[in-house]
């Protein structure tokens, strides 16, 4: 509903609608691109939406795709299987399959397969962080990841508490292996970690912990805090009418441009 009523950025196209990266109806991806042609392949942002791992649709985040595409990037937004249909780690497997599909088809929509930025909000930020930091999911494809953008992500939330987390990670034998902070190490991609000071759902301390671990490993980290912004407000600030509330879109675009042009 939010996406439906929000005015969208112009100068963009939905270049790919509902492409399948797996057999399940949830394994589909949309790709947004700038309308203007480019002689050189563009950096690709793969954005994973949040929703407590049990809700969300790619079409509900078209405003994110068009906003970032209007800044000159190719933007892929995949759906993925949700709880209770699946539990950890199936949604990460879906996210990884989506990234591999994007890489293999990048030339078809003007994207650079070797300049990927993984981004997400809330549970989607967790998904992005796990793919960026833990080599189990992307394997050799992880070398194409130039940056991680995490908006209000849970990265350090042991012990499992609350019905959402307990159901999502039910049956995990090694809880530590589910935590992004556990995988932070030398050679990881640069990270932009953002939180709203009024977030009551995912504690900003999660981002602080990941920042410390990455910096200790010598990884470049930009830690951004936005005053007077809550959990949902952090992502809705990307929408065209709400950008005055926080510079989230500007900061994401700047970070993406920086990491995609440097090694």
Image (cartoon, helix red, strand yellow):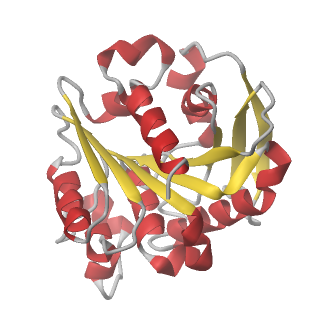
Residue lying farthest to the bottom in this orientation: 173
Question: How many dots with numbers?
Answer: 0
Q: Quadrant of residue 212?
A: bottom left
Q: Is residue 64 above or below residue 54?
A: above
Q: In screen coordinates, is 257 left or right of 35?
A: left
Residue drawn where x is 71% and y is 42% of the image: 31
Q: Quadrant of residue 171?
A: bottom left
Q: In screen coordinates, is 70 left or right of 257?
A: right
Q: Nearer the viewer, residue 83 or 144?
A: 144
> Where does the image place residue 181, in percent across and percent down from the top left?
26, 69
Residue lying farthest to the right in this orientation: 108
Residue drawn where x is 54% and y is 49% of the image: 260
Q: Is residue 47 above or below residue 230?
A: below
> Where does the image place residue 21, in percent across and percent down from the top left?
74, 62
Whether residue 177 is visible: yes
Q: In screen coordinates, is 55 left or right of 192?
A: right
> Where does the image place residue 71, in percent across and percent down from the top left?
58, 27
Residue drawn where x is 77% and y is 66% of the image: 23
Residue drawn where x is 38% and y is 66% of the image: 168
> Where does the image place residue 160, in percent across and percent down from the top left?
22, 69
Whether residue 1 is visible: no
Q: Nearer the viewer, residue 203 or 170?
A: 203
């Amino acid at each position: 509903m939010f996406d439906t009523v929000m005015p969208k950025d112009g100068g963009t196209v939905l270049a790919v609608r509902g492409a399948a990266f797996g057999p399940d109806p949830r394994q589909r991806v949309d790709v947004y691109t700038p309308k203007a042609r480019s002689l050189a392949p563009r950096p690709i942002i793969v954005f994973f939406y949040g929703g407590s791992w049990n809700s969300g649709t790619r079409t509900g985040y078209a405003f994110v795709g068009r906003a970032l595409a209007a800044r000159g990037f190719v933007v892929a937004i995949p759906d993925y299987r949700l709880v209770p249909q699946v539990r950890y780690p199936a949604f990460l497997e879906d996210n990884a399959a989506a990234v591999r599909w994007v890489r293999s088809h990048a030339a078809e929509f003007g994207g650079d397969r070797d300049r990927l930025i993984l981004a997400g909000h809330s549970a989607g930020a967790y998904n992005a962080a796990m793919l960026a930091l833990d080599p189990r999911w992307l394997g050799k494809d992880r070398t194409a990841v130039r940056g991680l953008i995490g908006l209000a992500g849970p990265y350090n939330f042991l012990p499992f508490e609350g019905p959402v987390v307990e159901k999502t990670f039910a049956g995990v034998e090694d809880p530590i292996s589910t935590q992004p902070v556990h995988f932070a190490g030398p050679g990881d991609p640069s990270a932009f970690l953002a939180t709203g000071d009024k977030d009551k759902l995912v504690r900003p301390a999660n981002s602080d912990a990941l920042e410390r671990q990455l910096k200790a490993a010598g990884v470049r980290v930009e830690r951004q805090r936005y005053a007077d912004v809550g959990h949902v407000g952090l992502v809705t600030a990307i929408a065209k009418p709400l950008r005055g509330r926080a510079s989230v879109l500007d900061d994401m675009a700047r970070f993406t441009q920086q990491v995609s042009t440097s090694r």
